Image: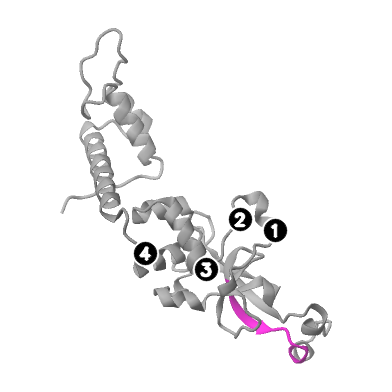
Amino acid sequence: MKRRVKKKDHENLSASNIQKVIDLLNPQGTDTKPSATSSTQAKPITKKEACEILNISYNTTRLARIIEEHIEQQEYSKKRKADLRGKPLTNAELSEIATDYLQGDSIAAIAKSIFRPAALVHSAIEKVGIPTRPANKAQRVHTELLPTSCVAEDFKPGEIVWSAVHHRAAVIKDELSVNYQAEKGGFSDVNYKAKYGSKCYCIWVLENIDQDKEFWISGIETGGYNAYSLAYDLGKLEHLKEYGVDLSRI
């Protein structure tokens, strides 16, 4: 099995940057090697300049491997897309779409990973009833509408749900019932059902741990924070199990 090129943190080995280097090495596009050009044609960059663009040490052997692997991946992606064209999404693909999207991946990234068009992924999210996130940071202050299949009035402790307010998965901890508030103390004894027409829950909003940060605990991949939410701002996710989604992964 061929060993894959390992990327170092400071290196810029994105697909777009590698393709840029290939184009600059070979302005005429006949192959991956620089070719002779006339005075009226663009002059190919040197391999040293190519390494500088990729921010890698000057190493022609490694440069060639990076380019070769990129071309192989592009060819494989093209073939997979052709093979899948016109075929319906499988449950395995729907499960991957739901899991990756609810974990925070973009539609574009998901489409690339499963070799499907972004429009098809977007359509699947709507069809399956996957809660959506705001398109940009400026819209995160708004509460997103939940799909009909996610709407529920009751939740149980330990259940994994979707918060339309925090735009993240969350875990139900307790219902803030009148009895619960009286037992715990420190609450105003609000009857949420009577006041808002909805039960209220204490939830743990899940967050991914950024392991690039200076402080984090080894082996811990998710963190989070406490919050309170009315039931109509929480989305049930149980229906996603029909497609093989493991909610514990979210």
Q: Is residue 66 something one can see in this rendering?
A: yes
**Residue that numbered label 1 is attached to:** 142
Question: How far apart, in angstroms, are the residues tagged by discs 1 and 3?
Answer: 19 Å
Q: From what the image shows, is residue 32 above or below residue 174?
A: above
Question: How far apart, in angstroms, are the residues tagged by discs 4 and 3?
Answer: 15 Å
Q: Check disc 1: other Cα within 10 Å, few if <14, some if 14-19, many if 20+.
A: few
Q: Check disc 4: other Cα within 10 Å, few if <14, some if 14-19, many if 20+.
A: some
Label 1 amino acid? His
Q: Is mark 4 on a helix, strand or loop?
A: helix
Q: Residue at x 24, y 44 (%)?
A: 75
Q: Is mark 1 on a helix, strand or loop?
A: loop
Q: Of tags 1 and 3, which is closer to the observer?
A: 3
**Residue that numbered label 4 is attached to:** 93
Chain-order first, disc 4 or disc 1 = 4
Magenta stretch containing residue 174, yes or no? yes
Are the residues tagged 4 and 1 within 8 Å (C-beta)? Answer: no
3 and 153: which is toward the camera: 153
Total label count?
4
Question: How far apart, in angstroms, are the residues tagged by discs 1 and 2?
Answer: 8 Å
Res. 148 image quadrant = bottom right
Give how far across and how far down residue 177 sits, in percent. 74, 87
Instruction: Give the magenta part as a residue range.
Output: 170-180
Question: How far apart, in angstroms, are the residues tagged by discs 2 and 3?
Answer: 16 Å
Label 4 amino acid? Glu
**Residue that numbered label 2 is attached to:** 134
Q: Is mark 3 on a helix, strand or loop?
A: loop
Q: In this view, does 249 lie to the left or right of 207?
A: left
Label 2 amino acid? Pro
Q: Quadrant of the N terminus?
A: bottom left
Q: Of tags 2 and 3, which is closer to the observer?
A: 3
**Residue that numbered label 3 is attached to:** 129
